[in-house]
Amino acid sequence: MRAVRFVAILVFCVVLATVAHRSVEAQHGPAQEVYRKFSVLQKAMQKLAEHEFASLTELAETPAGFKVLLNTVGKAGGDQRPAILVLGSVDPAHLAGSYLALESCRKLLDHPDLDQILDRVTFYFIPRPSPDATERNLVSPFDEVRTNKRPFDDDRDDRIDEDGPEDLNNDQVITQMRVEDPTGEWMEHPDDPRVMIKADRTKNEKGRYKLYSEGVDNDGDEAWNEDGVGGVNFDRNFPWEYADFASDAGSHGGSEVENRAVMDFAFDHPEIALVFCFTPDGNLEHAWKPNPQAEGKRIKTTLLKADAPYFDHLVEARKELQKPAGAPKPGTAQGSFLEWAYFHYGRWAFGARGWWIPDVKKTDEEKAKEDAPEKPDENAPPKEEAEEKEEALPPGHPPIAGPKKEAPNEEKPKAGPRKKEEKDKRGEDDIRDLKWLNEKHYMGFAGWEMIDHPDFPDRKVEVGGFYPRSRLNPPVEELESLVDLNVEWLTVLADKLPRIALETVSVTDLGEGLYRFRLRAVNNGYLPTESAMGGHSRQLQRLQVDLELPETAELLSEPRRRGLKAIEGNGGSAEEEWLVRFTGPVPDVIVARLWAPHVGTTALSIEMGGDK
Amino acid sequence: MSLCLRLAALTFLMTLCFGGISDLVGQDAPTKSSYKPMGAPADPKVGAHWNRFHDHASATKLMKDLTAAYPKLSSLESLGKSYGELDMWAWTITNTETGSHETKPAFYIDGGIHANEIQGPDVVLYTGWFLLEMYGRNEFVTNLLNERTFYLIPIMSPDSREAHFYKPNTTHSPRGGQRPVDDDRDGQTDEDPAEDINGDGSIQMMRVADPNGDYREHEKYPNLLVRVEPGEQGQYRILGQEGVDNDGDGRVNEDGDGYYDPNRDWGWNWQPEYVQRGAHRYPFSIAENRIVADFALARPNIAGAQSYHNAGGMILRGPGAKDDRYDPRDVRLYDVIGKQGEEILPGYRYLITHKDLYEVFGGELDWFYSKRGAITYTNELWTPFNFFRKSDEDSGFFGGRELQHVFDKYLLFGEGVAEWTEFDHPQYGKVEIGGFTKQWRRQPPSFLIEEECHRNMAFTLYQADQMPLVEVQDVTVRDLGGGLSEVTAVVANQRLIPTRLAVDVKNHITPRDVVTVSGTGDVEVLVGMVADSPYFERIREQKRTPSALRLEKIDGMSAVYCRWVVKGDGPFAVSVQSVKGGSDSRTSK
């Protein structure tokens, strides 16, 4: 009987293991469906290009054999209209960026007002500018990877890419390892033993663990995973404030084909007026602030004061669509695309993270509702965690089907980037995020699981922790609603662009065929025809005005074609005068033109018939 | 010099004397009986002229002829094509019988990145010609080519060099490349260049007689216009450079060929157009530079570099920008070489770019130092000191205007300045056109070209000789008993420059030097250590792979002391490999 029971348990275990394995496998299908591998993305972009107002362009082929692809949404002669350049996944691990850019493009093509929108604006979408690096996030074992595969000696030991991570517990994700060690500086959080915090010796605490990323010491240098495969991070390889010698920055700004492809496209398209990208390091959830002292320097590194009101206005407009409360603060901007777009390329430039684990206590309304904060599951048993993990989805991937628990926001613990408090804040972000994942039934954390580790034969080693990217990319339910929001956002951006018009102030007949023309260029949009930085950058073509005169006309006040300074929005204007003598018959109509690629072209027919 | 190297050189000499004459090729047939002055050979295998400048075709022919004549010393490869489909030549010179190019410390030289700075490429060509022709004739040169590699990129900006040769220009143009750029941001590119109205091949100045003008003729040199003093009657109004308003925007010559500056395009401290004029799009957005940078990136053995410009007689070092900083330990080396250069090059001054000239962001010499770890200078060729061998502090890069006219009158016999002549101008009516020809002011005249080539080459050869050169000086063995031996090696660098500059060590630009020990058959290395003195007072033990000791650097004129405890049989061989310092090995007795 005992033997039978043993066999039954064994069979059960095998079945359980198989189910677990299958469930992990199954998760990858939908994962790829949502956060597409390149091949799927390419097909989707090809499909979009079948629309009458869309097309597909290959900007570059990458070293891994993928392509930097661009969908244009616009009418014929699109380069005669201002354009908005949209990038997704500027941070290659920010898969949501690709998704939102692509899906926004798709939904924009279904927009009821598409025809009118495209009369004024062209859109360029590059959903996945760094396909090599992004693809590395979509293959097992899943990790949070930001670099392409260009070899690099991260630890400067003269060996290249010799010590990357390993999936030691075969759960197809790279998480962390904690190794019991009395000299370690890490300890379990008293409120949630899953969360690791640094011990504070002044508080009479002792560390109990050393913490590493999951893997073995391949090169025997007593460092773990310090030199994995690659490479260069797309969002560190732009030349603005470029970080020379940083391990993910490349050999120089623009060293990577992906970065050059995007920059060259941008420079080849002077009609681009505004750049929007999805990035965890954006300026819409955390607005850029001017710094008048820094502004006086030759090299600009802070938002120019004159541009700040316009940026603030757009930040407010975005807030109408998505409350930024609790969005994590951006990281370093060195070598980033967004800053390059504003400071070097000279365009209005905005970036949004798009999604984050909400910090419910950031709004007053929710604060008011707040009951006594419930403590997180203090004793979440490791066994339960392990079971949960078996059913878990890879990081940021769709949740398990099934009823969701009601998870009132007010129950969430205090967290987020937070004001000074007496309270010990160690690990509070982790606890908040764990609680949110738990409430939503989203799996983003692997409970600590004991393993045998070859580098620590006599030590207790456990593998676990947050799934990579699980706090960067939302589950699919949240994504869908974000698409609508971002399509609306694109129309808001289009609406804010300058709208130029040319008006006749006066045409004065001075006698004997001599006329004085006085014309006014007006901007009836919101944004000025160029930002202060745009003007400073010398990267925008000048706004020009011209009178088309017949050969019988002699211009007495040169030149005919003139450059204008920037014109503010909401009725801002500039006036110009020409003195013309007609030596033959005066034409019935004189045509004047006002244009710059990034604001468009407008013409004015001046009826000639004496004083006006 | 080792015996085998001496033999190689001797054989080469014999070949040259007895077998080589009949193979002579070249542009100037040498004579057997030439009385050889000091300096370049009177009977070169490949004749060359050094009193005129080489265009792309004649430079290509010279390099091909020399490579055909010296196949073991010279190789020529095209790195790709320029925008105008001209070959970007890379010319590698070293004795391949003593090691392939990448195994030796290398010196990089280029010229003409600013194409109008026309003599730079000729100095590079002269250097290649001289090294090849003097190999086997001169011990210093022979040693250099046995121990070192020279990478020469004579023409960095070939399209614009051709434009300067064969299209109307001034001595200052074209500085940039030939890709069209919309300089005035009006949506049209290169639509309003200068025009050679008088058809003499140079772009000069336009003037009209005007009693209300602010210029008058110089008393002694009527071709020279001088500004009138307050209260003085003027004679002329200057209308600017020769040309017309092609695009009807009221401005003359505001958008000619280019403009971008290939020497503001390099991937160190690069800044965009609003900070640095000519920066173009991003670092290495100019393809000619990118292929040269890729060439240099693939050759970490480059330990010294020179990029020739003109003018003003300067030996420039970086940093180009005042907020940048060179490591003081490296600056001490720069100073030693730079000061020696002032002696080799009379009239030249050793200067710092941002401090003594102007700020440069994205300059080539900064990239070679900061990103490749090579001591790098830019010589600004041609100095007004050479007019009359006198210093004139106030005369600027090109000499005072009056001095230029004096030199033109007495040494160029009026050839350097075109007389003012009347022409019809479509916008201004009758104008006079005159002034300097494009071949003059930044460039030496024919009779001074060879001297400029030789002295500047001499400076680079001095620097090349100071590059690190590693050597295993001594290997001793002590029997420790029980089958264990203690092997001690002295590994030295008998040159000024360390195997890795401070900037290299700090940023880990190139891999460390490696010293390995091996014995006869299977040898187990139990312990490996390094010390700075022969007494091993403060040792640094290397526990991982002790058989291959990794050194941060070997300082100039200095040694490191390596020691191993080894189980196994001798004799023991010790070898050193240094990316920038070469390699050597020695076996214990």
Image: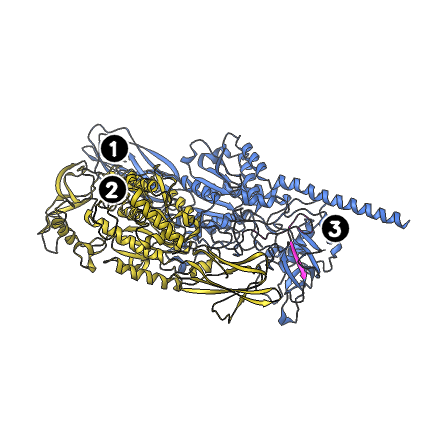
Chain colours: A blue, B yellow
Image marks 2 and 3: residues in contact by CB distance under 8 Å: no
Q: Classify A159 as above or below B335.
A: above
Q: Secondary structure at mark 2?
A: loop
Q: Label 2 belongs to which residue?
A: B251
Camera-side mark, 1 or 2: 2
Location of the C terminus of chain A by quadrant is top left
Percent across and percent down for residue A410 are 66, 55
On the image, numbered disc 3 is attached to which residue? A387
Tell me: A556 left or right of B108.
left
Nearest to N terminus: mark 3 or mark 1: 3
- Could you say where residue B19 lies in the image, as x and y percent from the top left? 31, 42
Query: Looking at the image, is B514 positioned above or below residue B34?
Result: below
Query: To which chain does the residue with label 1 belong?
Result: A
Q: Chain of mark 2?
A: B
Secondary structure beneath disc 3?
helix
Residue A229 lies in the magenta stretch: no
Classify mark 2: residues with Cα within 10 Å, few (<14), some (14-19) or many (20+).
some
**CA–CA distance between discs 3 and 1?**
89 Å
Q: Quadrant of residue A263?
A: top left
- Residue B288 numbered mark, or none: none
Query: In this view of the protein, which residue sits in the foreground, B317 or A95?
Result: B317
**Near-viewer residue (B375 or A584):** B375
Query: Mark number for residue A610?
Result: 1
The magenta stretch is A160-179
> Do the dots labelled 2 and 3 sit on one chain?
no
Residue type pointed to by label 2: Arg
The span from disc 1 to disc 2 (Cα, nearest Å) is 32 Å
Q: Amino acid at mark 1?
A: Gly
Q: Nearer the viewer, residue A218 or B516?
A: B516
Residue sitting at the far right: A1
Is A174 magenta? The answer is yes
Is most of the magenta stretch helix, strand or loop? loop
